[in-house]
């Protein structure tokens, strides 16, 4: 850029002169920028409107092409203790239901734990410092040292061994129990362990069995060593028996021969038991694992065949997990929870009840709601499109330059730009095509059961042209709709037809939805100017904006060159004047000096 010397010798306001000279060219450049801005605004507006049209197309209309979207059913129960969710495939019927038993979650409430020194037991208390005292305050007979003892928690097919060491605290034990797959908590206030299954039902129940005498004593001092012969402890007893059953076979047998026989058939239960005792499941060193397994088998045999009653936690309560039992039309079903799914019905019981009547039938309100929701979405879109297409012109309004904005307040700028943005779709041919396609589809007739039906046959139509509010002349109203202030007082023909002939209603609206879907599909196909799924010429618009950007950049460059040309000319003029003034001064000085 040349040096800009302005008016120093000429006394002219060259800056203003040059700006006036390039004013016309600057105006042309500003107009290009304004056209580009307006097109960018329209691109954004189209992108937003496209989302709304596409939502109707790929969402509502796509679903309503199928009768399953309308086939709503409902089920009533004669007893409030039963609730039912009705699936689309449920059969219309009247059925008899009884609930003989509710599902239960396996639960163990431990006895109160005691410390050896009589202090309060907290989460930080070490398990090795716990004991069980007799009536005289002495540790009960048969209680072993708990350190090194272990017991196994089994739930949902997973077995986890928990070992008590010198550092195991009550809080640490609770963490290990939770990691083993049960819900556990130590209540310091009541001094009891609470252990529960993570879900109700038989298969979700848990068992806790000792691996050795020290583990048995550990369960005792923790207050969770419930009597295996007590009601509710059948699963615990069965777990001990599972191991004890191998006692006669393996006790006293040659170790190497026994291991060889076990690993010869990996499909057996005894092989799985052996693998469970290995720290590394991939190892083939079965020697140490066999010793642990035999200790557990021998101890399980002792538990089942010896008097261990003195070590059982007398105040502990064990509830086993149970399945719910439903009897529907004489057939019995079990469920791990109090909910069962049968033939399209999801039934939930809150109490044990007998002879409950379940009545399943078509949900006429459901079909009505589907139609009403569809028309609501259609009306919202068609009203918006009508408003955009018939918007007032914004003649004389163009996007503002920065200089123009500086002369206006923020509210004035917003009002000005809103006026332009509201008019962007005025008489837009693309929008008009979509608008007319939707209206034409809605006015079509469809043959159902040998008869051609229209929306009017269902009490659905537009208002009188001269009575309808502006931009609402294409909005559809349902006669008798309580939420519609225009037609709420009319007879509800749609509900009446749903009640008397739901197949005709469903048949009509599936065909109507398919027609509208196909029309929009055709309007959103990929072309040289638009992408697939776009209802406007998004490709072309993007190219046009890029073209404007190039034109604006070129115009700016030309404007800059034009300004520089004038600045250069005026600069030369100023230099020439400077030289002339210098010569005049010299001559004046020369002649003045000669007098």
Image (cartoon, helix red, strand yellow):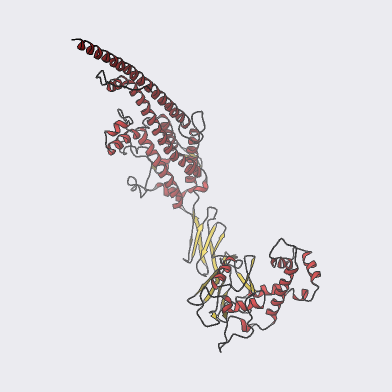
Viewer-nearest residue: 402 or 375: 402
In the picture, residue 243 is in which quadrant?
Answer: bottom right
Indicate left or right for 180 with 481 as reference: right
Q: Is residue 315 above or below residue 474?
A: below
Residue occupying the far left of the picture: 595
In the picture, residue 402 is in which quadrant?
Answer: top left
Q: Is residue 316 above or below residue 70?
A: below
In the rendering, at what x and y percent does residue 424 appear?
37, 32
Viewer-nearest residue: 283 or 395: 283
In the rendering, at what x and y percent does residue 356 appear?
51, 66
In the rendering, at what x and y percent does residue 281 appear?
70, 62
In the rendering, at what x and y percent does residue 462 appear?
37, 39
Q: Do we see residue 88 in this rendering? A: yes
In the picture, residue 219 is in which quadrant?
Answer: bottom right
Q: Residue at x 70, y 66 (%)?
A: 278
Viewer-nearest residue: 423 or 136: 136
Q: Do we see residue 225 in this rendering? A: no
Residue occupying the far front of the picture: 594
């Amino acid at each position: 850029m040349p040096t800009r010397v302005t008016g120093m010798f000429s006394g002219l306001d060259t800056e203003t002169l040059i700006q006036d000279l390039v004013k016309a060219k600057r105006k042309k450049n500003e107009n290009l920028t304004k056209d580009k801005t307006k097109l960018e605004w329209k691109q954004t507006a189209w992108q937003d409107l496209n989302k709304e049209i596409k939502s109707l197309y790929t969402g509502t209309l796509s679903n309503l092409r199928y009768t399953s979207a309308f086939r709503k059913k409902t089920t009533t129960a004669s007893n409030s203790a039963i609730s039912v969710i009705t699936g689309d495939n449920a059969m219309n019927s009247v059925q008899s239901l009884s609930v003989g038993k509710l599902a239960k979650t396996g639960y163990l409430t431990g006895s109160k734990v005691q410390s050896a020194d009589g202090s309060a037991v907290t989460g930080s208390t070490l398990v090795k410092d716990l004991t069980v005292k007799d009536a005289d305050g002495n540790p009960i007979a048969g209680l072993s040292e708990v350190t090194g003892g272990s017991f196994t928690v089994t739930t949902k097919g997973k077995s986890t061994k928990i070992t008590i060491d010198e550092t195991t605290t009550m809080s640490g034990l609770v963490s290990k129990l939770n990691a083993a797959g049960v819900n556990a908590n130590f209540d310091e206030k009541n001094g009891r362990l609470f252990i529960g299954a993570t879900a109700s039902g038989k298969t979700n129940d848990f068992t806790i069995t000792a691996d050795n005498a020290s583990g048995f004593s550990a369960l005792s001092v923790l207050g969770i060593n419930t009597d295996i012969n007590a009601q509710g402890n059948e699963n615990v007893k069965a777990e001990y028996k599972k191991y004890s059953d191998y006692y006669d076979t393996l006790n006293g047998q040659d170790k190497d021969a026994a291991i060889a026989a076990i690993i010869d058939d990996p499909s057996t239960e005894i092989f799985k038991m052996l693998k469970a005792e290995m720290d590394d499941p991939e190892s083939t060193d079965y020697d140490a694992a066999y010793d642990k397994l035999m200790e557990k088998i021998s101890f399980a045999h002792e538990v089942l065949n010896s008097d261990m009653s003195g070590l059982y936690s007398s105040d502990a309560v064990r509830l086993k997990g149970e399945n719910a039992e439903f009897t529907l039309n004489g057939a019995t079903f079990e469920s791990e929870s109090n909910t069962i799914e049968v033939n399209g019905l999801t039934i939930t019981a809150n109490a044990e009840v007998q002879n409950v009547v379940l009545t399943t039938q078509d949900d006429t309100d459901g079909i009505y709601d589907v139609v009403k929701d569809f028309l609501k979405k259609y009306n919202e879109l068609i009203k918006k499109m009508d408003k955009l297409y018939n918007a007032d012109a914004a003649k004389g309004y163009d996007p503002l330059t920065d200089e123009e904005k500086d002369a206006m307040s923020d509210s004035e700028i917003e009002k000005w730009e809103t006026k332009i943005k509201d008019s962007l779709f005025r008489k837009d041919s693309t929008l008009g095509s979509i608008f007319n396609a939707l209206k034409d589809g809605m006015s079509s007739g469809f043959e159902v059961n040998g008869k051609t039906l229209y929306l009017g046959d269902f009490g659905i139509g537009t208002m009188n042209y001269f009575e309808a509010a502006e931009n609402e002349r294409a909005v559809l109203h349902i006669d008798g709709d309580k939420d519609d202030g225009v037609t709420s007082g009319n007879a509800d023909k749609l509900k009446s037809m749903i009640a008397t002939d739901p197949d005709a209603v469903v048949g009509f609206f599936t065909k109507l939805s398919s027609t509208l879907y196909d029309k929009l599909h055709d309007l959103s196909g990929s072309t040289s100017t638009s992408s697939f799924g776009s209802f406007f010429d998004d490709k072309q618009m993007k190219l046009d904006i890029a073209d404007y950007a190039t034109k604006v950049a070129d115009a700016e460059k030309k404007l800059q060159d034009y300004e520089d040309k004038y600045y250069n000319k005026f600069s030369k003029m100023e230099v020439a004047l400077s030289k002339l003034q210098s010569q005049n001064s010299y001559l004046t000085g020369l002649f003045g000096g000669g007098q």
